[in-house]
Amino acid sequence: MSDGQRSRQARWRLVMGAGSEQSCGGCLGDEDSSREACLGFLYDREYGGGRNVRKGRAGGRGAGDSDDRTGGLGESVLNVPDWINQVHELFPQNTIERLEKDALERYQLDELVTDPELLSRAQPSTTLLKAVLRTRHLMNQDVLAAARHLVRKVVEQLMERLARKVHSAFQGSVDRRQRSFLRIAKNFDIHTTIRRNLKHYDPEQRRILIETPYFYSRIRRQTDRWQIIVVVDESGSMLDSVIHSAVTAAIFFGIKSIRTHLCLFDTEVVDVTDHCTDPVETLMKVQLGGGTDIGHALSYASTLVDNPRRAIIVLITDFYEGAPPGRLFSVTKQLVESGVTLLGLAALDDRARPDYDHRIAGKMVDLGAHVAAMTPGELAEWVAENVR
């Protein structure tokens, strides 16, 4: 059997569902088997609990629709948060939208996005956090408030666990006080204010509209401090890394010897440094999915660099560049030649198991960048070693 025939057979098996093995054969690999489990979790409700044979997954509501729902927020083989996360990892965007629509409208599988009381009772976990971030665009304001409270609980757990690892890497150089953004005239930073607000230039009036003024902090006088610029790809496949990046950046922000910036990107860049001390606010701004323009993000990061030889840019991405890669390579070369230390991370989470474009990453290594996959603790050790 050719690969094309095997692929078509697998697609028919996924359409027909369990019970079609005799017609379609045992043609599912590991990934397709996971897809089968996700589809079964939703569409097996069509003909009542306990029935294994389905007549297909594209039809309308059946007369025997079941009210026996296996979903919930408790621990089980596959629960609602698990299902949401697996759907987002296994299917393309148009399929995800159809599955979410069917889950909410056809089967009323809406516990996670409509019931604030259920969310308030749920046991905080990273799995539940990811499911909330992936579905918050479906939530009303009451549910979103409960979801935000849940996100904060999970983030606090992560902060408590990761802070010890990060702090120990810097051997007591932690400044536990939060940075103060005092708007005092004598501390007004005119150069940074102009540079960051150039996008608001009005050519007709020949003036810059200042949306965000910038001020030197009280510890700005320590000009020898290192600068860490964390740039995070917010595509759906990078969600674990986004979560750990937000928490790790918040911890870095409290280290006296470092000035930390945090930026999120897809095809555009959002500088969330002002929310760096609050990872919850950062995560609630994440827009999962969309395109990826790594070159544009790295170009923006280069504008934040004050002293190249005391700057580290941590680029967290899977290196699947959606734009022509020439710009990415050009900016990489310019940064490395200027003296910036560029670290590309294909994963930043507890497992540090990456899935990334080896060709793009390899080319960046050839240009002088470092590429790895790390846990937050390993990243802290790497940064501490470089800033000493």
Image (cartoon, rainbow, N blue to C red):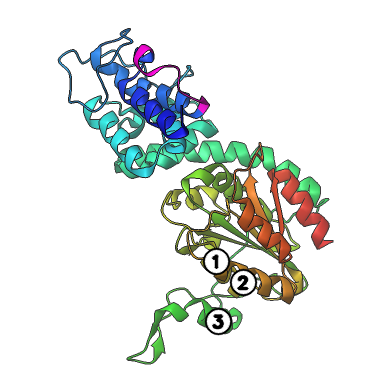
Q: Name the residue under label 3.
A: 185
Q: Is residue 225 magenta?
A: no
* Mark number displayed over residue 331: 2
User: Does label 3 or label 1 sit earlier along the sequence?
Assistant: 3
Q: What residue type is labelled 1?
A: Gly
Disc 2 and disc 1: Cα gap in Å?
Answer: 7 Å
Disc 3 and disc 1: Cα gap in Å?
Answer: 36 Å
Q: Which residue is drawn at 55% across and 65% down?
A: 325
The relative height of residue 16 versus residue 160 in the rendered view (above or below) is: above
Q: Which percent across, then down, holds residue 361?
A: 65, 56
The residues colored magenta run 22-30
The relative height of residue 34 versus residue 96 in the rendered view (above or below) is: above
Observer-nearest of 7 and 340? 7
Q: Is residue 200 left or right of residue 234?
A: left
Q: Which percent across, then down, holds residue 212?
A: 46, 73
| Residue 375 seen in the current view | yes
Q: Which percent across, then down, holds residue 333?
A: 67, 71
Residue that lies at the very extreme toward the front in this rendered image: 1
Q: Which of marks 3 and 1 is in front?
A: 1
Q: Does the magenta stretch include residue 28?
A: yes
| Secondary structure beneath label 3 | helix
Q: Mark 1 points at which residue?
A: 295
Q: What residue type is labelled 2?
A: Val
Q: Residue at x 49, y 48 (%)?
A: 283
Discs 3, 2 touching: Cβ within 8 Å: no
Q: In which quarter of the image is the C terminus?
A: bottom right
User: Does label 3 or label 2 sit earlier along the sequence?
Assistant: 3
| Secondary structure beneath label 2 | helix
Q: In this view, does 359 lie to the left or right of 150?
A: right
Observer-nearest of 313 and 208? 313
Check disc 1: other Cα within 10 Å, few if <14, some if 14-19, many if 20+: many
Q: What residue type is labelled 3?
A: Ala
